[in-house]
Image: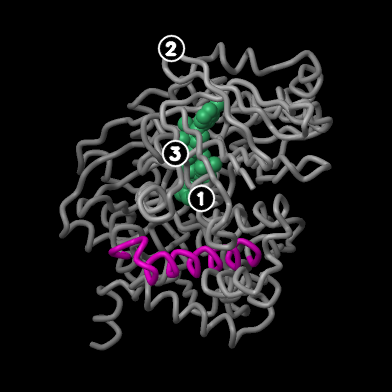
Amino acid sequence: MDVVVIGAGIMGITFAKIAKQLAPDLNITIIERLKHAAGSNSSVFNNAGTGHEANCELNYTPVDEEVIAVEKALTIHAQFNVAKQYWAYLVKSGVVKDPASIIHPTKHCTLVSEESVGLLQMRYKQMSAHHFFETMQISEDFDEIKSWIPLTMESRPRTQKMAATMIKHGTDVNFETITKQTADHLIKQEGINIEYGTHVYRVHKSPSGSWLIECTQGPDRVQFRADKLFVGAGGGAFPILKRSHIPSRTRFAGFPVGGRFLFTEIDEEMAKHYDAKTYGKAAVGAPPMSVPHLDLRANNGRHYLLFGPFATFLPALEKGRSIMEYIRATYFHDIPNLLNVAREHFPLVSYLFKETFKGKTAMLKTLEDFAPGLSKRFEWRVIQAGQRVQIIKDGDLQMGTEIVVSDDKSYATLLGASPGASVSPEVMLRAVRELMPKIFKTSEAKAALEEMFPVSDLDKLIEDAETYRKIRDDVNATLKIEAPPQRQLEESA
Ligand SMILES: Cc1cc2nc3c(=O)[nH]c(=O)nc-3n(C[C@H](O)[C@H](O)[C@H](O)COP(=O)(O)OP(=O)(O)OC[C@H]3O[C@@H](n4cnc5c(N)ncnc54)[C@H](O)[C@@H]3O)c2cc1C
């Protein structure tokens, strides 16, 4: 069977690897417009690298009239556990040589000021009762919080009442290295062809029933044929869907939200000193992905701090692509949907406009509020992050992701951006199942599935504490996710 995957980001590459493991006979071609893998949102500093498992993100536990909902947090945590199983498999099977190149243990903390202390306590009570978050700690003690996340507290007046939660075994994930190492392996070990520098401008079905994928390759026009087509092209998936003639294409439009970060390099000693990702509370009207956070990042043995993201409203499909491409990908039938979102989400749209024009001084002021003294302690520069294109479906703005599949199950695409790369293996496993259910039936496929995903059933992980703990500890050992050294020393002291 001929399979074409459009996009060599973490989604497309993960899709190809899982499919090939299940059915080695598949003839897979990956088409990528850039000259290498992971050049768009999966590139290391185009995202924040948080291994999203709901340890610290308040937006995964919405509050409605004093009732806190934890279901979304449980699902995301379970999905991340499935992702870790798959990455541990990449390490065990030699695709990833050194786990430290892809994943780093770091504390995940939430920090709030006086008016949200009650909210944090309520969240802590609900979450720590579940085995996923049983190691979560909470504190309102200034010095204890300072020992967890020193950079946010060291210059803060002691009179400011703060509260924080902390989980030791959070992670910083380098989605770029996962993608690049897997892409390299696919080419060298699995014989998969990646056509770099090849831009897909149209896909359509031939009279014989197979997909024709029309591309430009430099000055040339080239064409590929596929029995099954998976589009994992980030924001670039929208125009491809629009031109696919799949009936559901008119239900979807894209709502672009860009991001910027404050960025600085730090030395190893400072990295050990801070060793955390700290999430705060989003401003009123801000989209959920604009929750401010101060992140320790690691890349190639060097350490960085990121603060942000500062949202931008740039109508583009991906970072580096022109506004014209977004306009060309917008059809008449999209206009009512876009207008509906502008009307229903007016505070969001006006927030995004304001944020777009925020200068560096204002960004440093936001950092200063989050972590007093930090804006002057390091030399910060502003970097452009990736571009999220959120889904507008039937006129409603959605913050999650969706796999859209054609009725004949020959075309599947991933739309949307959140929680994103962290859950990519679980989402791509579902996409492979949607598109090619038959390849799961052989005994070889069942063995391969078991090897990649010992427990992929989210409900089992949510309900069965013993199974979850065993899997968590096994994958943490393979991925070398141990408690950050600072805390271990404190405990043994
Ligand atoms: C500011 C920001 C912060 C984020 N932080 C986090 C985080 O902390 N944790 C997390 O888990 N996720 C985070 N994300 C989300 C994460 O980056 C994405 O979910 C993930 O990278 C998406 O992977 P992808 O493969 O779908 O897209 P991409 O990595 O963008 O890959 C898509 C590929 O398709 C190619 N392509 C597009 N159009 C075409 C075409 N027509 N022809 C050929 N090729 C094409 C592109 O060149 C690209 O290489 C963040 C995103 C942003 C923007």
Name the residue that disc number 1 marks. 421
Which of the two residues, 33 or 205, is positioned nearer the viewer here?
205
Hey, what amino acid is under mark 2? Pro
The stretch in magenta equals: 74-99
Disc 1, ligand 1: is the CB inside 8 Å?
A: yes
On screen, residue 59 above or below 8? below
User: In the rendering, at what x and y percent does residue 187 appear?
Assistant: 39, 47
Structural distance between the alpha carbons of marks 1 and 2: 33 Å
User: In the rendering, at what x and y percent does residue 405 appear?
Assistant: 75, 43
For marks 3 and 2, the one nearer the N-term is 3
Q: Looking at the rendering, which quadrant does residue 99 occupy?
A: bottom left
Q: Which residue is drawn at 48% across and 67% down?
A: 84
On screen, residue 104 above or below 368? below
Name the residue that disc number 2 marks. 219
Q: Looking at the rendering, which quadrant does residue 268 occupy?
A: bottom left
Which label belongs to residue 194? Answer: 3
Q: Looking at the rendering, which quadrant does residue 103 occupy?
A: bottom left
